[in-house]
Amino acid sequence: MSMNDLLDNDAQEPLIASVRGLSLIWLVPLLAALIGGWIAWKSWSEQGPTLTITFEDGQGLEEGKTKVRYRNLEMGTITRLHLDDDRRRVIATAELKDGAEDLLSKATRFWVVRPRIGISQVSGLDTLLSGAYVEMDVGTSKADGTRRFTGLETPPTVSVNTAGRHFRLFSDRRGSITQGSLVLFRSIPTGIVTDVKLATKERRVEFDIFVRAPFDKLVTKNTVFWDAGGLSVNLDADGLKVNVDSLESLVAGGIAFGLQKGVEDGDPAAANSLYFLHESEKKAEHKRSTDTQRYRVFFTDSLRGLNIGAPVEFRGIRIGEVLDIDLEYNPDNLEIRTPVLVEIELDRIEVIGKQLDPSTPRKTILSRLIEKGLRATVKSGNLMTGAQYVDLVVLPDAPLVAGSPEHTKGYPMIPSISSGLNLWEQRVNKLFTRLDTLPIEEIGGNLNKSLAQLHLTITELNKILKPIDKRAGINTQAQLMTTMKEFGEAARAIRDLARLLENNPQSLLLGKPASGKRKTPTPTPTLH
């Protein structure tokens, strides 16, 4: 038997067994699919709202890396960055966590936190290592489904949740005040300037400030605000005063507020109330009048030193200020005039007595005072600076001067008079003019001729008196000697006066010069 036969005999047909059910090998992909589905469902269920934020530029933003935070808690991630249709702004798409939809409303604000260094504040230095991120500030409004937002270019100075109130101020100039400047009450920080903008329609600068609670209760309807930045220098009768409200306001500017002296607190001010920002504390102390009247004054004196804003006073009390100084020329009579527009605060004039009805308009009272001799004059307010002011005086004997309509331009006129100093200046100028016209040299020459003639007369008189000396007695001779001596002194005085006038003609006004030695006079002939 061959080997092949043996193999053929041993070979058996395979047994095929049928297995019912699913093979275990399929459990692996099924399990993977279930895990993947669970992960996908979990990711979908935990996914929050998707929103878009528009920024001016994308500085510091990166897709998939830049985080969105709220109170230092991570709330989402910036997933996409692209330009808008105009290609002028950057639109950032952010995906927030589940539950963040309750934080989204029209009051929600977004801004990029990056390193910022300014005069008033330094912020975002921690992002030098961690990178920039988007910060969100949630308002008090309820969620309203808003998903499109415009990002702030600068971080807000006050959080929406900070207790306090906002107020608005306006002024003609910005001064040293910037966003972030302090708001002070008696040199204590109580708030901050949130915005500075130019109102083009009103042509003024407007400030938005925020005063924290409980200091916001200090702001009432009678409160005044002033610029407290930099140095305040005041020169008055008490000397030179330099005032600095605080070191912070000196560097970054600031706004202070308070009450004028003698003014009560008044009712609390409503939020967003509008106030005027005074240039300084000194000007804030001056009460703003609501009843004013403008007048024109024509001065003949020099107005050098009279500036716009100079006070108008009556018996030392400020009742107005200078608004404008102009120059007018009339070709008909070749006349040049200097009209000054002043504003009088009529409510500073209190009406008393029974002869006048208290309801009488105060401008009528001022018109009567003008008829009684009220006049305006320019006086020096400070000898060091040369500043002048307008002073009102009552001169009953002063003639009434009426201004023509073309000169007053619709404003009533207050007649003017020259001030005492200007009158003296005019008199001195006239005196010097007359001195210049005097023939001093001619007068001196005539005096010299007279003195020479007098010298000859005295010589001849001595010749005549010599024979008399022999016959006259001692008493007669002594009397003649005394008389001639006095006569000689008078002649010497006349000669000295002539020499003085010839060398110093102004001595008629100013007196004899203090310096210089007097020359020895020529000896006068004496009797022998």
Image (tube, grey):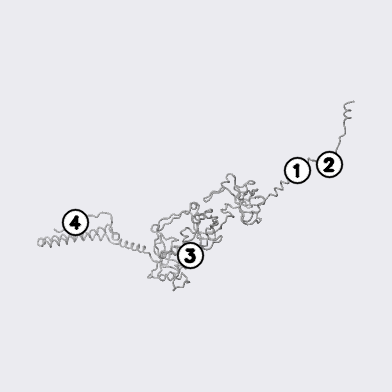
Q: Position of residue 432 (x, y in %)?
A: 32, 61
Q: Residues within 10 Å of mark 2 (few under 14, many from 20)?
A: few
Q: How far apart, in angstroms, are the residues tagged by discs 4 and 3?
A: 78 Å
Q: Which residue is disc 1 drawn over?
A: 31
Question: Residue 109: x and y, percent?
Answer: 61, 53
Name the mark nearer the viewer: 2 or 3. 2
What separation in Å lies between label 4 and label 1 (alpha carbons)?
147 Å
Q: Which one is in front in this view, the residue at disc 2 or the one at disc 4?
A: 2
Mark 1 to mark 3 CA distance (whole Å): 87 Å
Amino acid bearing label 2: Arg
N-terminal of the two: label 4 or label 3?
A: 3
Q: Secondary structure at mark 3?
A: loop
Q: What residue is disc 3 on?
A: 289
- The amino acid at mark 1 is Leu
User: Who is closer to the viewer here, 269 or 198?
Assistant: 269
Query: Which is nearer the eye, 225 or 323?
Result: 225
Identify residue type, mark 4: Pro
User: Mark 2 highlights which residue?
Assistant: 20
Question: Which residue is denoted by mark 4 in the rendering?
Answer: 523
